[in-house]
Amino acid sequence: MNLIRCNWTQNDALMNEYHDQDWGIPVHSDQKLFEYILLDSFQAGLSWKTILYKRKNFELAFAGFNPNKIAKFNEKKLESLMLDAGIIRNRLKIWGAVKNAKAFLLVQKEFGSFDTYIWQFVNHKPIINHWKKIQELPAKTKESDAMSKELKKRGFTFVGSTICYAFMQAAGMVNDHLTSCHKYKK
């Protein structure tokens, strides 16, 4: 049985799996939300496929996406990550992961959970879009603009509006499945 999917997967097996099991499904786990922030911050300037194919390596390199552990990474650990060919070896992004982990923990402390904080940008419910063609999907929205601005104020890095919108799509804060896609729900 051939399922109709959003064509950005290019029918790649791993991209199809991510599309079907992750993308656009509302996430309320702080651990998973942090994973998406970390991965999306490394995506800046790169394709999602590149990141997705390194996802397991990122999980190993970044302590299972545990912000408490990442916030404690020291200079020696960060330098060792610069030698890890399994991840994106960008100094600013690697050091940014520690900065984002620390900012994430501060948000958790202030709001009780990151989930409570981040979902406010969509009034705590997913925005359901009705796109027919992939070209209709925006790169950013007023919600991602607001999220980007606020995250930057709170000390996050690599959280421009386009990255925030990609995060919103991944975390199911927006449903951007095409209307022809088997994952689209009316």
Image (spheres, rainbow, N blue to C red):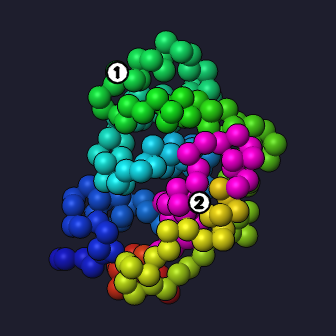
Return the residue nearer the eye: 45 or 22.
Answer: 45
The crowding category of the residue bearing disc 1, from other C-alpha atoms within 10 Å (few below 14, some 14 to 19, many at least 20), is few
Dots 1 and 2: beta carbons under 8 Å? no
Q: Residue at x 50, y 45 (%)?
A: 41
In the rendered structure, the answer to whether residue 41 lies left or right of residue 7 reads: right
Q: Position of residue 95 (x, y in %)?
A: 54, 29
Mark sitting on residue 99: none
Which residue ends up furthest to the left in the rendered image?
Answer: 1
Residue sitting at 62 percent across and 37 percent down? Answer: 100
Residue at 37 percent of width and 84 percent of height:
133
| Amino acid marked by disc 2 | Ser
Q: Earlier in the sequence, mark 1 or mark 2?
A: 1
User: Gap in Å between the C-alphas at discs 1 and 2?
Assistant: 30 Å
Residues 50 and 66: in front is 50
Range drawn in magenta:
149-176
Work out which quarter of the rendered image holds the N terminus and state it.
Answer: bottom left
Mark 2 nearby-residue class (10 Å; few <14, some 14–19, many ≥20): many
Q: Is 133 located above or below residue 170 in the figure?
A: below
Closest to the observer: 26 or 83? 83
Residue at image mark 1: 83
Name the residue: 33% across, 25% down.
84
Q: Secondary structure at mark 2?
A: helix
In the displayed image of the protein, which residue is found farthest to the right? 110
Q: Is residue 36 left or right of residue 110?
A: left
Residue 15 location (% of width, % of height): 29, 59
In the rendered structure, does residue 20 fall within the stretch colored magenta?
no
Quadrant hosting residue 161: bottom right
> Which three-letter amino acid code belongs to the residue tagged 1?
Leu
Residue receiving disc 2:
161
Residue 44: give x, y in percent of width and height.
Answer: 46, 49
Residue 8: quarter of image: bottom left
SS for callout 1? loop
